[in-house]
Amino acid sequence: MDNSSLVSVLVLSYNNLKYMKECLNSILEQNYKYIEIIISDDFSSDLKKDDVEQFIIENKKGNIVNYVINQNPCNLGTVKNLNKAISLANGNYFINLACDDLLFDSEIISSIVKFFSDSNYL
């Protein structure tokens, strides 16, 4: 696999972690072959990195090729937190989610990649 087919799903969070597992589940259920998950938390008071990592490990399939769980050392704000997530990502395609967002169905990432591939927008 080369990075031209890798999709980086950027999950941004800040003190709304009660939705994290639902968000991650919607990513883990995707049928696209090469996904990395980049979680960038903006210094939430209740982030439990070990719990999030354990959830990913227990629920991921072979299509999750990488994951990163970052917590900023201080609150940077949304734009800088997004920039941090981008700097940690390796994919050619980025999908940005807040941790209280969900992907509608298991084919969303495949559909996005197909659209950009077919339309040659890159």
Image: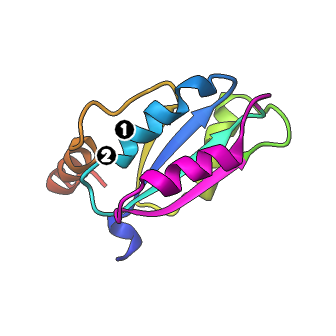
User: What percent of the width, then of the height, locates residue 97?
Assistant: 47, 34
Mark 1–mark 2 distance (CA, rounded to whole Å): 5 Å
| In this view, 63 is above or below 85 | below
Q: Is residue 107 visible?
A: yes
Q: In screen coordinates, is 70 left or right of 111?
A: right
User: What percent of the width, then of the height, locates residue 101?
Assistant: 44, 26
| In this view, 76 is above or below 57 | above
Secondary element at image label 1: helix
The kind of residue on which mark 1 rests is Ser
User: What percent of the width, then of the height, locates residue 71?
Assistant: 74, 44
Q: Residue shown at 46%/40% (left/top)?
A: 24
Q: Is residue 27 magenta?
A: no
Q: Residue shown at 62%/31% (left/top)?
A: 13
Q: What's the magenta region?
A: 44-70
Q: Mark 2 = which residue?
A: 29
Secondary element at image label 2: loop
- Viewer-proximal residue among 90 and 118: 90
Q: Residues within 10 Å of mark 1 (few under 14, many from 20)?
A: some
**Residue contact at pointers 1 and 2, CB within 8 angstroms:** yes
The kind of residue on which mark 2 rests is Glu
Q: In screen coordinates, is 62 left or right of 48?
A: left
Q: Residue shown at 35%/68% (left/top)?
A: 4
User: What percent of the width, then of the height, locates residue 23?
Assistant: 45, 34
- Viewer-proximal residue among 74 and 118: 74
Q: Mark 1 = which residue?
A: 26
